Image (spheres, helix red, strand yellow):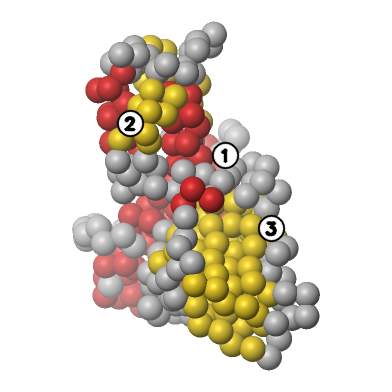
């Protein structure tokens, strides 16, 4: 039984649209698998909350976010605790409305996960994909990402740097103009407009027209005007990228440091106004493997920083003491 059918199955139970025999079968289904119990518990919680709010303004966005959070937790390796036996709820008009709200909310949930993610550089330079991959788009670029059971697919317009999460069971496939790029997990740039690919790490398979080319670390492919592909061996220089890929600094002014961190983690910092940051510098090795909290802690120790977290993607710096 797929996820959609499971949701409908739970919906029928919650709305009381089952006879005694079906109810018995449902109880067996719930108790035979911890994931079934978890799903039933999550949807029951949304259902009970909606009963209390259905006469008011039911916040479908909040319910969706809540179920998504619970679903993410249930699929991230967290242990699922058994849930108590639930009695069959009596069918009342209010309950029927609440149960319908579940279908609407979860339909939204299913659409979100079965649909596509669209990112463009005008809204954010870095795109964090649901599979764990990261994409940094150059100005004017756009990507559309679709995640399926057997493949991860991206359509690229413009130029982007990909840091692809490894997944041997699902290749990562990029369509960029006439180019088709397939990898399992690596880092490289793709320029759809120029018809070029530059591999930093790993192996990339490129197909265009009738040709198939494999590229490895420090190899650059350029498609010329005649459609021929020229492969060149040269060192991938991170300095040529439009963002600080290694997130390392050498006597870098503080405002540039903050801008680089913002682009890398897709967050925003509000800096104190009216400051000259040219003599307020920062030096460090690569911070790319650190979390944003760890990076902020490093800055706090360096500058006696006072940093307030506004939300998950916004911070305010109210005090920066330069040395």
Q: Which mark sits nearer the N-terminus, 2 or 1?
A: 1
Q: Give me the residue at 51% from left, 60% from top.
A: 162
Q: Are marks 3 and 1 in contact (CB under 8 Å)?
A: no
Q: Are marks 2 and 1 in contact (CB under 8 Å)?
A: no
Q: How far separated are the C-alphas under marks 2 and 3?
A: 32 Å
Q: Where is residue 206 in the image (x, y as percent from the top left)?
A: 57, 79
Q: In this view, does 313 lie to the left or right of 210?
A: left
Q: How far separated are the C-alphas under marks 2 and 1?
A: 50 Å
Q: Where is residue 70 in the image (x, y as percent from the top left)?
A: 37, 52
Where 19 falls versus 122 (above or below)?
below
* Crowd tier of the residue under label 2, counting other residues whose Cα lies within 10 Å: few below 14, some 14–19, many 20 or above: some
Q: In this view, does 272 lie to the left or right of 34?
A: right
Q: How many marks?
A: 3
Q: Which mark sits nearer the N-terminus, 2 or 3?
A: 3
Q: Position of residue 242 (x, y in %)?
A: 56, 46
Q: Please name the residue that numbered disc 1 is placed on.
A: 58
Judge whether residue 65 can be spotted in this image: no
Q: Do the residues labelled 2 and 3 touch (CB within 8 Å)?
A: no
Q: Position of residue 161 (x, y in %)?
A: 53, 57
Residue extending farthest right: 225
Residue extending farthest bottom: 210
Q: Please name the residue that numbered disc 3 is placed on.
A: 158
Locate the C terminus by quadrant.
top left
Instruction: Find residue 201 and report its image quarter.
Output: bottom left
Q: How far separated are the C-alphas under marks 3 and 1?
A: 41 Å
Q: Which mark sits nearer the N-terminus, 3 or 1?
A: 1
Q: What element carries label 2?
A: strand
Q: Give me the residue at 66% from left, 46% from top.
A: 139
Q: Please name the residue that numbered disc 2 is placed on.
A: 283
């Amino acid at each position: 039984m797929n996820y959609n059918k499971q949701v409908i199955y739970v919906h029928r139970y919650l709305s009381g649209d089952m006879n005694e025999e079906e109810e018995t079968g449902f109880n067996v289904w719930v108790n035979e698998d911890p994931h079934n119990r978890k799903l039933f518990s999550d949807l029951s919680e949304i259902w009970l909350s909606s009963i209390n709010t259905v006469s008011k303004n039911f916040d479908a966005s909040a319910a969706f976010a809540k179920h998504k959070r619970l679903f993410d937790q249930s699929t991230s390796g967290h242990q699922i605790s058994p849930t108590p036996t639930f009695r069959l709820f009596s069918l009342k008009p209010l309950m029927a409305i609440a149960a319908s709200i579940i279908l609407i909310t979860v339909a939204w949930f299913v659409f979100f996960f079965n649909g596509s993610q669209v990112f463009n550089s005008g809204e954010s330079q870095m795109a964090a994909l649901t599979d764990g991959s990261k994409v940094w788009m150059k100005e004017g670029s756009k990507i559309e990402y679709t995640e399926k059971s057997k493949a991860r697919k991206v359509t690229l317009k413009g130029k982007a740097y990909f840091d692809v999460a490894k997944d041997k069971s699902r290749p990562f496939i990029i369509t960029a103009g006439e180019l088709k790029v397939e990898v399992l997990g690596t880092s490289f740039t793709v320029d759809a407009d120029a018809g070029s690919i530059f591999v930093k790490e790993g192996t990339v398979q490129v197909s265009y027209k009738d040709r198939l080319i494999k590229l490895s670390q420090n190899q650059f492919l350029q498609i010329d005007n005649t459609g021929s592909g020229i492969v060149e061996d040269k060192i991938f220089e991170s300095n040529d990228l439009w963002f600080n890929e290694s997130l390392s600094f050498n006597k870098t002014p503080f405002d540039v440091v903050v801008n680089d961190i913002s682009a890398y983690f897709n967050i925003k910092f509000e800096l104190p106004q009216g400051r000259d940051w040219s003599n307020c510098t920062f030096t460090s090795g690569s911070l790319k493997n650190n979390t944003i909290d760890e990076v902020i802690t490093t800055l706090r120790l360096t500058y006696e920083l006072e940093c307030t977290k506004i939300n998950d993607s916004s911070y305010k710096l109210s005090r920066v003491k330069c040395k």
